Image: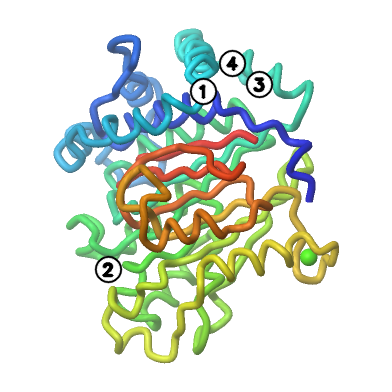
């Protein structure tokens, strides 16, 4: 575990978070004017082969209907103060990349490569079965992978389904699993809504998922389908350890009958325990070079230490973590605290990116 050898690029974070605001379907807030990355993405990249056939053309209108314009307002304050100068510089580079048709490595990546191995972590949270957004998200993921093919990971922070729109719920959310699989989702934490129909139902859905589903603080009568952590070894050799956690409020969020025998331990204590395991030099319990928490818990506002359960987590989670991708509260922010990058990707397919 040597967090210090990786250079965190806040500029990269800012640009990606901005770009992804558009993918949630919200109006794109460009500090310099009008250009939105979203239309270009939908025009130049065809819908993925298996994602919701025939639905691609409806994405934009669907996104706008459900998402309105709240996200940019929430995202802007969180990311502007981080490092405005570098953010603008990186954004300019990102824009150039879009205009020139996306070379495999942008100028920022070339610079990064000389001093550190770049890792790009893409994240969605609270997707809630918005499968019509699948082709747009998928296009973005492919675009980002092309820029950093050896170092990109696509993750989710839970509530992938449940409280879904009709086109997913009518088929018991099987379409959501199919779309997430087709998008190449690589790792996800659990969310409260995945337990809406009880653990027995969720188990089947985990079995149908091509990605590991993590719930490190879910204990008791839980079969081994639910793992606590998952280490992705990138082609560039870096081992990224993901730890999945879920809100401790579960007993009041879902029907007790469906979660009988399950207990929900402290997200902070669990995160720190698993972080120690992944960095103790013992391969038997997993080892990672970089730690990322996917936590289905979030603050009420973009002020992550304003109060509540997330304040406790933000103040107590081990500084061994490089980034925390939160969820549950449907807001968006990107802020550094205690040397850890805290991000939350809003909802329905808005996303965030971390480059470390
Ligand atoms: Ca270990």
Q: Point out the frontmost of discs 2 and 3.
A: 3
Give the farthest residue toward the right: 281
Q: Point out the frontmost of discs 1 and 2.
A: 1
Marks 3 and 4, Cα distance to the nearest angstrom?
11 Å
Scheme of image coloration: rainbow
Residue 351, disc: none
Please give the residue where the numbered disc 3 appears in the rendered image: 109
**What's the residue at 39%, 83% (across, down)?**
200
Disc 4 residue crowd, few under 14, some 14–19, many 20+, Cα 10 Å: few
Q: Point out the frontmost of discs 1 and 4.
A: 1
Q: Earlier in the sequence, mark 2 or mark 3?
A: 3
Q: Earlier in the sequence, mark 4 or mark 2?
A: 4
Q: Position of residue 196 (x, y in %)?
A: 29, 74
Quadrant of the image occupied by residue 216:
bottom right
Q: Earlier in the sequence, mark 1 or mark 2?
A: 1
Please give the residue where the numbered disc 4 appears in the rendered image: 103
Local secondary structure at mark 3: helix
Give the farthest residue toward the left: 65
Please give the residue where the numbered disc 2 appears in the rendered image: 172
Local secondary structure at mark 1: loop
Q: Of 275 and 223, which appears nearest the observer?
A: 275
Q: Is residue 294 left or right of residue 118?
A: left
Marks 1 and 4, Cα distance to the nearest angstrom?
26 Å
Q: Is residue 218 left or right of residue 49?
A: right
Please give the residue where the numbered disc 1 appears in the rendered image: 83
Q: Earlier in the sequence, mark 3 or mark 1?
A: 1
């Amino acid at each position: 575990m040597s967090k210090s050898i990786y250079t965190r690029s806040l500029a990269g974070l800012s640009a990606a978070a901005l770009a992804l605001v558009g993918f949630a379907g919200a109006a794109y807030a460009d500090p310099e004017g009008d250009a939105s990355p979203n239309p270009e993405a939908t025009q130049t990249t065809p819908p993925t082969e298996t994602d919701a056939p025939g639905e691609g053309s409806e994405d934009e209108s669907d996104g706008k209907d459900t998402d309105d314009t709240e996200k940019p307002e929430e995202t802007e304050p969180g990311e502007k103060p981080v490092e405005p100068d570098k953010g603008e510089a990186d954004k300019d580079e990102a824009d150039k990349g879009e205009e020139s048709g996306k070379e495999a490595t942008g100028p920022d990546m070339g610079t990064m490569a000389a001093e550190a191995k770049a890792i790009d972590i893409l994240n969605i949270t609270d997707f809630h079965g918005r499968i019509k957004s699948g082709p747009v998200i998928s296009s973005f993921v492919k675009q980002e992978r092309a820029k950093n093919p050896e170092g990109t990971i696509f993750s989710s922070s839970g509530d992938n389904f449940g409280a879904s729109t009709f086109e997913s719920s009518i088929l018991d959310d099987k379409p959501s699993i199919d779309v997430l699989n087709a998008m190449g989702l690589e790792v996800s934490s659990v969310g409260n809504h995945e337990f809406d129909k009880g653990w027995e139902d969720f188990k089947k859905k985990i079995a149908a998922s091509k990605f590991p589903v993590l719930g490190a603080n879910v204990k008791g009568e839980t079969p081994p389908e639910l793992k606590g952590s998952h280490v992705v070894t990138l082609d560039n050799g870096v081992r990224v350890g993901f730890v999945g956690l879920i809100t401790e409020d579960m007993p009041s969020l879902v029907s007790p009958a469906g979660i009988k025998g399950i207990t929900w331990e402290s997200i902070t204590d669990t995160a720190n325990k698993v972080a120690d395991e992944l960095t103790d030099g013992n391969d038997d319990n997993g080892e990672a070079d970089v730690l990322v928490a996917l936590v289905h818990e979030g603050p009420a506002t973009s002020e992550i230490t304003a109060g509540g359960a997330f304040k406790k987590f933000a103040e107590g989670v081990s500084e061994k973590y490089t980034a925390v991708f939160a969820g549950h509260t449907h807001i968006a922010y990107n802020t550094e605290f205690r040397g850890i990058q805290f991000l939350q990707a809003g909802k329905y397919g808005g996303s965030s990116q971390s480059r470390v």
